Amino acid sequence: MWKAPLDDGGNRVTGYLIEKRDCSKGKDNWLPYTDQCKDTFVTIQGLNENSEYEFRVMAVNQNGASKTLVTSQSFVIKLPFGVPQAPGEPQVNEIGNDFVTLSWSKPAHNGGAITGYWVEKKEKQSEKWIKCNLSAIQTTWCNIPNLIEDKSYEFRVFAENEAGLSEPSLGSKLVHIKDPHAAQSPEFTAKMSDTDAADGKTAYFECQISGTPAPSVSFYRGTKELFDSSKYKISHEEDKYILAIHSVTLDDEDEYSVKAKNKGGSRMCRANLTVKAAPKIKLPERYKSTVMFEKDEQVTIKIPYTGNPQPTATWYKNNEEIKDSAGYSCEISNHYVTLKMNKPSHNQSGDYRLKLSNALGSDTVEIKIVIADVPEPPRFLVVESVHDESISISWKAPENDRGSVITNYIVERLDYSYTVKLNESEQNVKPVSELWTRCSMAKRTHFTDETVRSMHKYQYRVIAQNMQGRSAPCEPTSVITTPAPENRLRGKKWYEDKTGKRRRGRDGLAPSDY
């Protein structure tokens, strides 16, 4: 815009000549823009954006053109306003099975009138943004159709004015396209986990479950469904479900599960219950009375127990602690305590005690173990009577039968009638091979030998026998000498008198005694 000349030179001004110069192309590079301008203002078009220009004007009449009037400064060609700032982060207002409705806030500074908004989408794990609208959106909300169900998307928005597009907004939160009214199978937002409780206390299993519609929830022990009772209590608060098990014992240790089900499907979660308890020994019936084993038999005492955590096991014999050694082996597993004896002897018989201990307490049990062995020798062998044709002896049973009942006694005799010289120079004699010979098997503790001869020398000894074998012989009797023959009726009806004549009747009986 400019003012008309003060002096038109005597002829009316017929118009104005307008010229322009691109400052980047030299000082003399003036180009005519128009010579048809009749007004004192003009709009110059066709300039290059962001280029710097100068302009000049000349008044024209019939006599020619006046001197030039140059603008006082150069001008950079650009809009008088900038692009808008980015809009606010898109918010999700509604989700369907194939659409989403978004809204956003206007830019804090629009740089000029907003002409519209553009929305872009991006699938999860993709880097490619895709424009959603074909023309600028005139509102701060829109509906985005043609989305794929069960896919997740992120959205962003651009604002536009005459200066151009803004920077993109912050991306929206990831949106999962799903019909909110469609059935959604249950999901465990917090799974049930393994738990433990002390004996006699209450154990709890908890989980959180989502699903549409709200699922029905059931708890199980193994395959058995649980219901409210004095033992079990099932409760829930919103999406949290709780199973309480009252007064737990070791018998309650098991796998527990929870099953959630609706028309969209079902889900199951499992966990284990561990009960902490003082040890309790479960002594088998066979160990409640004396336990018998044979000598050299492999002995294994296996005793079940309950308790958690696993206790320590200590064995005692006659109140003295047993250590692992060549004679003993002690083991403990999750449910059993084992004591082993390798080739035991009668010396290992005795009163055994097992003690189990853990942090919650202890338990003790006693077992009497007898290792059967051959008995001790009989005792107190004495000669009861000696005759020319018989010798009677008696004895006492062994002090210790070593765990096996005496079945019989073996009576052995040494007959001094059979002798042999040891050598030519010695006068002493020795019984033949000095071997004792068996003369009887006795059930009782006395015996009469009726096979002896008069005026002979004998010795006796006794051996006790049980199911394990024979004892060592007892101390033998002293040497016994049978007397000279006696005159006896021996069951006959006659006898010899002093003269050697045979007479009827018994010796010493008078006829008056008949």
Image (cartoon, rainbow, N blue to C red):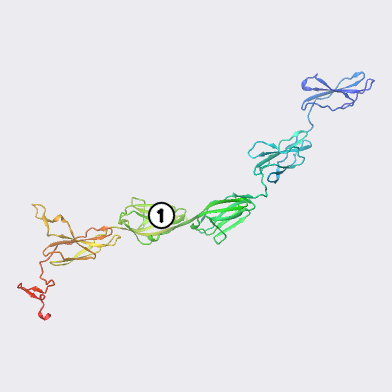
**99 relative to 230, above or below:** above
Q: Which amino acid does label 1 sit on?
A: Val
The answer to whether 75 appears left or right of 11 in the picture is left
| Residue nearest the viewer, comparing 309 with 503 | 503
The quarter of the image holding the C terminus is bottom left
> Which residue is outermost to the left?
499
x then y, percent, for residue 467: 28, 59
Residue 129 vs residue 404, the one in the foreground = 129
Reply above or below: 271 against 393.
Answer: above
Residue 117 picture location, percent across and down? 75, 38
Dividing the picture into quarters, in which one does residue 453 lie?
Answer: bottom left
Q: From the viewer's perspective, is 473 left or right of 363? A: left
The picture quadrant where one finds residue 443 is: bottom left
Report helix, strand or loop for mark 1: strand
Q: Mark 1 Cα within 10 Å, few/some/many (few <14, many 20+)?
A: many
> In the image, 20: left or right of 438?
right
